[in-house]
Image (tube, rainbow, N blue to C red):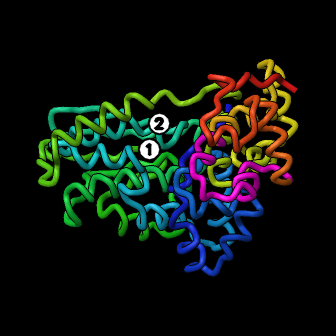
Amino acid sequence: MTDLIRSAGLSCYPEVARSLGLDPNQIMRKVRLPLACLDRPDVPIAVTGLRRLLELSAKASGAQDFGLRLAERGGLTNFGTVGLIVREQATVGEAIEAFSRFIHLHHDGMRLDVARGRQTVTITLHLRGRQPRAARQSIDMALGSVHRIIQSLFGSDWRPLEVHLHYPPPHDRKPYRDFFRCRVTFNADDDAIVLSAHDMERRIPSAHPLIADYLRKRIEAIESRPRNWEERVDEVVRTLLARGDCTVERVAEHLACTRRTIHRHLAASATSFSAILDAQRADLVVQLIEDPDRPLADIAMQLGFSAQSAMARWFRGRFGCTITAWRRGVRPLTEPPAATAA
């Protein structure tokens, strides 16, 4: 199953790539990541595509610390709702626990283990992938982001006790020492950040308990991410359709696979791409036509119809009346009929 990550993780990619003499659009095309995700932070993209992008960028630029450069420009805002709930915790320890608890909502394949000792606390990073270990640029970006988040809760003067990285040392260790500002051990058993146990008790002045409780309840209500192909495709279709750019080819880009793969997996679930698209169109169209000033031609284009007339025929077949009648309050069907698998 393809792991997904919010495209917000790439928000700083163009800036970093250009600073190293790279053309970000060209590199993204090579790894088949949709360029539109650079402007849309909540679009899900395949983790495998992100990893290929980081490794190719590091190789093309000669910057072995490419992942760290991305992490350096990131922060809590890159993590969306997860970042908000972290910021509102009462202590740094509670913030770290909340981050490890909810990080899967931002990155399906990322897990953090927080082991508390009497003197130290170790935060161990796990990135799921086909290989026994994720590639080094992905590890640098993820662990570097964890470091930046903790630092943002303390201020720029904070530093961990140690950082462990499982891979061999780079040719130049200085960027790692400058970024983490502590002892960095390579060829370690795990990828981890070690900090003082006292750091966990640090109060966060900006924390608001009521907001934290509200965000926790909200995030718990949506934290069950889709796990099978039908639900994954449905999630991406819903996101892209709302932005007027939904085709099976676009969905395949986001899931880092081919359209044939999508059709095969959906057929195994007794559904189809057209059935999922049809259901999402039906859900969205009734919201869009509520605005009488919105041109139907624009709605048809957003929903991916070849013409307004094509949407009109589809709407009548789907809802049993014309769009004009629907706008006047006619509701022949209380619910749209379920689409059949093609």
Label 1 packing within 10 angstroms: few (<14), some (14-19), many (20+): many
Please give left or right for residue 329 compared with residue 169 in the image.
Answer: right
* Figure quadrant of residue 279: top right
Task: Indicate whether 280 appears above or below 256.
Answer: above
Q: Is mark 2 on a helix, strand or loop?
A: helix
Q: Which residue is drawn at 22% across and 38% down?
A: 94
Question: Residue 319 versus residue 41: which sits nearer the camera?
Answer: 319
Disc 2 and disc 1 in contact, CB within 8 angstroms: no
Tell me the number on the disc at residue 250.
Answer: none
Q: Position of residue 124 (x, y in %)?
A: 39, 39
Residue displayed at 42% across by 50% down: 79
Q: Does the magenta stretch include residue 37?
A: no
The crowding category of the residue bearing disc 2, from other C-alpha atoms within 10 Å (few below 14, some 14 to 19, many at least 20), is many
Looking at the image, which residue is at 76% across and 29% down?
320
Residue 124 vs residue 300, the one in the foreground: 300
Q: In the image, which is nearer the foreground, mark 2 or mark 1?
A: 2
Check if residue 299 falls in the magenta segment: yes
Q: In x, y percent, where is residue 80? A: 41, 50
- Residue 136, can we see it? no
Marks 2 and 1 sit apart, C-alpha to C-alpha, by: 18 Å
Q: In the picture, which quadrant includes the N terminus? A: top right
User: Magenta residues?
Assistant: 285-306
For the C terminus, the image quarter is top right
The disc labelled 1 sits on which kind of residue?
Asp
Q: Where is residue 171 in the image (x, y as percent from the top left)?
A: 54, 67
Please state which of residues 133 and 21 is positioned toward the viewer in this rendering.
21
Q: Which mark is residue 104?
A: 2
N-term mark: 2 or 1: 2
SS state under label 1 = strand
Q: Which of 170 and 113 is in front in this view?
A: 113
Residue located beneath label 1 in the image: 191
**Which residue type carries mark 2?**
His
